Image (cartoon, helix red, strand yellow):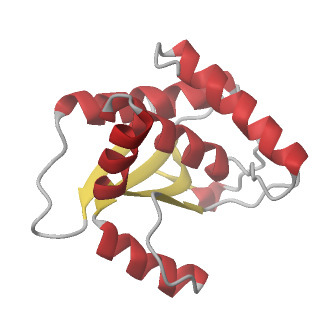
Amino acid sequence: MNRITFQYEKENIKELPASITQAIEKAVNQVLKDQKIEVLADIAVTITDNEGIKEINKNYREIHKETDVLSFPMLEYEKPGVIFAAPDDYEEGYLVLGDIVISYEKAYAQAEEYGHSPEREFAFLATHSTLHLLGYDHMTPEEEDVMIQKQELSLNNIGLCR
């Protein structure tokens, strides 16, 4: 089983309900399965607030505003989803794919705005971010189409359709 660890960036942030952490885990595992990733993966999920993600966004991307999710891949890819890993990329038998940072405030607000459950929104953000950890991007319309298709496939496969 893949290793997905949760950490809470600020002292005032309580743990997410189990239904949401389970939705995130299911989403991440489903993306890895759908993309035929055959190694044990290690992904860290950090939960923060709008102020925390704004600070991270400023420090790492020089964008001075909050966002819903950030992805920090540990590997470089010649082709998205095709892993060529060195022994140094593994920790305790797990391939370290990277980090996902989610603003719980933004996720809850977007769930309400889009009229679906928080579980669906957190799963969507985790799906989107996991694809980034696998080298996918959405800088061009073609890349965006590929990501949308892959996101929908994984969300549908875990029963969290739109």
Query: Residue 111 placed where, x, y %?
Result: 37, 39
Residue at figure coordinates x 71%, y 51% from the top left:
85
Q: Quadrant of residue 23?
A: top left
Question: Can residue 17 be seen in the rendering of this structure?
Answer: yes
Is 144 on the left or on the right of 142, as rendered?
left
| Residue visible at 36% across and 56% down in the picture | 106
Q: Residue at x 38, y 52 (%)?
A: 45
x%, y% of residue 151? 63, 32
Q: Is residue 26 above or below residue 127?
A: above
**Identity of the residue drawn at 70% across and 25% down:** 36
Vertical order, 87 against 154 (above or below): below
> Which quarter shows the N terminus?
top left
Which of the pair 148/32 is nearer the observer?
148
Horizontal arrangement in the rendering, residue 36 relative to residue 91 (left or right): right
> Taking 106 as reference, is 159 left or right?
right
In the image shown, does 51 or 19 lie closer to the viewer?
A: 51
Location of residue 133 in the rendering, given as x and y in whole percent from the top left corner? 62, 51
